[in-house]
Amino acid sequence: MAEKPHLNLAVIGHIDHGKSTLVGRLMYETGAIAEHVIEKYREEAKEKGKESFAFAWVMDTLKEERERGITIDIAHKRFDTNKYYFTIVDCPGHRDFVKNMITGASQADAAILVVAAPDGVMAQTKEHVFLSRTLGINQLVIAVNKMDAANYSEERYNEVKEEVSQLLGMVGFKASEIPFIPTSAFEGDNIKEASSNTPWYKGPSILDSLNALTVPDKPDTLPLRIPVQDAYTISGIGTVPVGRVETGVMKKGEKIIFMPSGAVGEVKSIEMHHEEIPEAVPGDNIGWNVRGIGKGDVRRGDVCGPASKPPTVAEEFTGQVVVLQHPSAITVGYTPVFHCHTTQTACTFMSLDKKLDPKSGQVKEENPTYIKAGDAAIITVKPTRPMVIEPVKEIPQLGRFAVRDMGMTIAAGMCMSVKEKK
Ligand SMILES: Nc1nc2c(ncn2[C@@H]2O[C@H](COP(=O)(O)OP(=O)(O)OP(=O)(O)O)[C@@H](O)[C@H]2O)c(=O)[nH]1
Ligand SMILES: [Mg+2]
């Protein structure tokens, strides 16, 4: 049986707006999780006084997540529609776990933005939309959720739709082309089929709109790049890095290199969903066994590429950024943490080259003395330790980053050029 086309789908939005519940509901409605499992969660959750979290527990499997009733780490789960199979990445909404959300969003081809109807747009709704855009997600579906808690009111739905549309417009999404769906993840309204609770709504259900997404062009003609998420040492087998293939194709027997470490090895085997595969293509989440490298040669944040075309290690790079928030002003010397593919590296602002109009991209000022929230700019930065980054024009998947400091996302942007470290 031929596999259906595959899409990575992130579920994003403010804390408690119902992301995990929506994912649990989607898995239940598509048969990926059985009724009796939900029943079991309902009973366990009830004992803990958290009955309403039964669906969220499908995704929130960590003890702390269940006790606090929040998502902390990203979780991957699979479910199928009749057209596609999805790897769903459920992101945390809590502001302390935005870095996990960034990892989740950077793996996604499309996202469902969940906005609770009673609350409307909140702080992490804005932050997640902004980050998704900057991390290259260009297909969105909006769930205006908890409609049951807003009396299934068409008026409230329209208010929230208007509010979200404005937000989307600000970061350059075309809101008129994006489906907005009034849902109750809790009650199951408009998830699979049209609900009689919203007779005024004539659009698609969540599953209909997921089937209407398009599969992005597989960037398999670009050089191989696999950012390492983790590396395991398995006795009798050896070193097994895991990660998602961003670009290119990796074949068994190929000679590969890990940068910045420079460790070289040969691909002995490739595994996905616990099955051995002869080659891996963009979008595949894999583990691969490497001959010739030892424990400690590979770590999270490294990038695997062909030995003949190694990933680029930056001495310095220029980036185009948009400043989302900062308590004061950013000047030369500022050293926040850059999150790029799977690496988190402190980088120093060496120069502020140009200030841009965030909407038109026109230059407003050369060499500004500072930049602040709302500004867009071209900057030159220097990583405090070796890191891989590629110009967005050459390998878009490895050219986007988010800038974090003080527990907040300060800015997000893309790499325009790299001065290579020799
Ligand atoms: N009334 C109502 N409650 C909902 C709905 N969806 C989720 N909830 C409730 O909202 C609470 C939070 O749900 P979660 O699914 O954990 O929210 P979340 O967005 O995943 O939260 P974080 O992952 O911590 O950001 C739970 O009590 C849910 O039962 C809905 O459609 N209607
Ligand atoms: Mg959650």
Image (tube, helix red, strand yellow):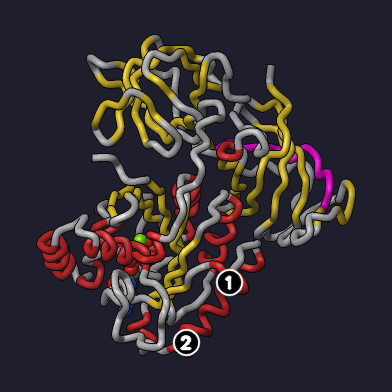
Say whether residue 151 is left or right of residue 39.
Answer: right
The spot of residue 370 in percent (x, y) is 81, 52
Alpha-carbon distance for marks 2 and 1?
18 Å
Q: 10 Å neighbourhood of mark 2: few (<14), some, or many (≥20)?
A: some
Is 304 placed left or right of 172 in the picture?
left
* Residue matched to label 1: 176
For discs 2 and 1, the disc positioned in front in the rendered view:
1
User: Magenta stretch mostly in which secondary structure?
Assistant: strand
Position of residue 143 relative to residue 399, above or below, is: below
Q: Say whether residue 354 is magenta.
A: yes
Place of residue 34 in the rendered image (x, y in percent of width and height, measured from the top left): 14, 59
Quadrant observed for ligand 2 in the rendered image: bottom left
Q: Is residue 416 magenta?
A: no
Q: Pick whichever, 286 or 342, lies toward us.
A: 286
Residue 282, compared with residue 262, is above or below; it is below
Residue at the disc numbered 2: 156
- Range drawn in magenta: 344-355
Residue found at the very far right of the displayed protein: 366
Specify the quadrant of the image occupied by residue 274.
top left
- Residue 324, by quadrant, is bottom right
Relative to 59, is 180 above or below? below
Question: Which sits in the foreground, 194 or 313?
Answer: 194
Instruction: From the top left corner, tell me how far across and down residue 88 is, in percent.
Output: 35, 52
Residue that appears at 73% across and 27% down: 419
